[in-house]
Image (spheres, rainbow, N blue to C red):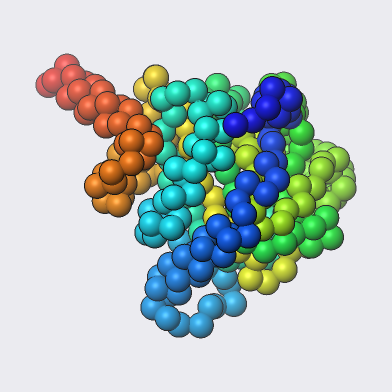
Amino acid sequence: MLSCGQKSHFDTFGFVVVRQAFSEMEMNVITKAFDNVLLQDRDGSPLSETGQSVWAVVEKAPDLIRMVENDKVFDTVKQILGPNFIWAGSEGNITSHKQHYWHADRPGDQEIKYPRLKAIVYLDKTSVKRGALRVIPGSHKLPFHTDLWPLQANHDRQKKNPIPGLGINSKDVPSISLESSPGDLVFFSQSLFHAVFDSFPNRRYIALKFAAEPSTHYEIGSLIKHSGYKSIFEPHPSFTSSKSSRIHSMIRPLREAKVRTLLRTLKQNTEEN
Ligand SMILES: O=C(O)CCC(=O)C(=O)O
């Protein structure tokens, strides 16, 4: 559970860090499960120089699924997104790049209206000088979000320094670094601008993604656009066969959204014919 102060911090600045949400013992279990899933995914081969990304990493290991059911994750997400929040997938990453330029995961003023949340657990220590996630506080809100559009354009296309339209280098953009030790949980709005600089090889992290219950066709469309129809509407068998009421509560609204989408398509097709 977030305190009132932490919740206000999230609402105002777009992120909150829960320190030592997981104990050392829990982190040992999580790290071992993560390493196993990624090793299996590359068929036991050595890690490539370009790192590795695995979608639905959490869904592939019971020890990782337990993270999502944990109060520190589940209750916090519920506080931020509301009781009917949905599961929007997970990623396991071992990064090799030195930097990841400024971007919002769900950029644009329309996207801001639909709350989506990322929770990251870094499995290796990061610091200001060594690969910590940087964020621009308050950039999940309008009009600041659109004022920062040159950052998104630079991420999507040129990757230039200085940044066209802002005239400063990426590393000099005013921001704060969210240093992290294993066990910390970093929550941030997917509309928030974030970046990584001075990273190191084999930096490992697990990202859990959540969204408020979709209530409009735009929101359903956005989920499909960003996550893919299959990964949104066809949850992993480990989730559909789970005995956990928490896991089911996160995928149930998706089933309802899928039915609404199919009915709408059917109606459109009928009207066209
Ligand atoms: O590499 C990281 O720490 C965060 C990656 C990132 O930018 C993202 O998850 O969108």
Picture coordinates of residue 100 (x, y %)? 68, 55
Q: Can residue 217 be seen in this view?
A: yes
243 or 173, which is in the foreground? 243
Picture coordinates of residue 59 (x, y %)? 38, 53
Picture coordinates of residue 170 (x, y %)? 80, 50
Q: Can residue 191 be seen in this view?
A: no
Q: How many labels does the image show?
A: 0
Position above or below: 132 against 240: below
Q: In this view, does 19 lie to the left or right of 223?
A: right
204 or 76, which is in the foreground? 76
Q: In this view, does 76 lie to the left or right of 146?
A: left
Q: Which residue is drawn at 63% across and 46% down?
A: 21
Q: In this view, does 206 lie to the left or right of 42?
A: right
Q: Which residue is drawn at 40% across and 73% down?
A: 40
Picture coordinates of residue 160 (x, y %)? 76, 53
230 or 180, which is in the foreground? 180
Q: In which quarter of the image is the N terminus?
A: top right
Q: Quadrant of the C terminus?
A: top left
Q: Which residue is drawn at 47% across and 65% down?
A: 33
Position above or below: 109 against 161: above
- Kindly indicate the quadrant of the structure image that contains residue 222: top left
Position above or below: 159 against 273: below
- Kindly indicate the quadrant of the structure image that contains residue 253: top left
Position above or below: 218 against 32: above
